[in-house]
Image (cartoon, rainbow, N blue to C red):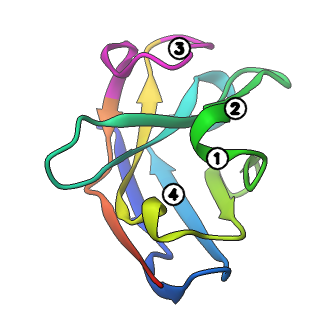
């Protein structure tokens, strides 16, 4: 059974940083596409970043603007999202997801397993 457990969210002031972690069990993260999505109240779930087999990485350039970095630690079987220069518009529930293949890209429907979500709140 695949489980994704997120941690690292919280409350931060604008301009601050947070690092989200996603610990996986039942699946080797290096072999599958891993993604981060976020959802704000009243909005659709939005793609943030993805990392696939090898060195494949994709960002939602419009929303993260070079401020976020996705990474993976194969030894810990975990994926991370480093978020810098946070803005109030980044406030959302952030979800870690695991795709069905080595590269799933930005489509939420391509991801098979999801974490429980982790609240990130950025105050102005």
**What's the mark number on residue 104?**
3
**Is the residue marked by circle 3 packed among few (<14), some (14-19), or many (20+) residues within 10 Å?**
many
Query: Which residue is identified by label 1?
Result: 64
Quick check: 74 above or below 61?
Answer: below
**Towards the viewer: 100 or 109:** 109
Label 4: which residue? Answer: 23
Start-end of magenta stretch:
101-112
Q: Earlier in the sequence, mark 1 or mark 4?
A: 4
Q: Any mark on residue 30, and which?
A: 2
**Vertical side of 48 occupied by 75: above or below:** below
Q: Which tag is nearer the camera, tag 1 or tag 2?
A: 1
- Foreground residue among 73 and 85: 85
Q: How crowded is mark 1: few (under 14 residues within 10 Å), some or many (20 or more)?
A: some
Which one is earlier in the sequence, the residue at label 1 or at label 2?
A: 2
Q: Where is residue 23 drawn, in percent x and y?
A: 51, 57
Could you give the CA–CA distance between mark 3 and mark 2, rounded to whole angstroms?
Answer: 13 Å
Q: Position of residue 75 (x, y in %)?
A: 76, 53
Q: Is mark 1 on a helix, strand or loop?
A: helix
* Tag nearer the camera, 4 or 3: 3
Q: Residue at 50%, 76% (x, y): give it.
A: 8
């Amino acid at each position: 059974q695949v489980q994704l457990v997120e941690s690292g969210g919280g409350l931060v002031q604008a301009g601050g940083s947070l690092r989200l972690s996603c610990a996986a069990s039942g699946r080797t993260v290096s072999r599958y596409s891993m993604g981060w999505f976020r959802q704000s109240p009243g909005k659709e779930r939005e793609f943030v970043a993805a990392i696939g087999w090898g060195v494949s990485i994709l960002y939602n350039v419009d929303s993260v603007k070079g401020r976020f970095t996705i990474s993976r630690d194969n030894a810990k079987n975990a994926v991370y999202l480093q978020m810098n220069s946070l803005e109030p518009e980044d406030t959302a529930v952030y979800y870690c997801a695991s795709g069905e293949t080595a590269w799933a890209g930005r489509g939420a429907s391509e991801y098979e397993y999801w974490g429980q979500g982790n609240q990130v709140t950025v105050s102005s």
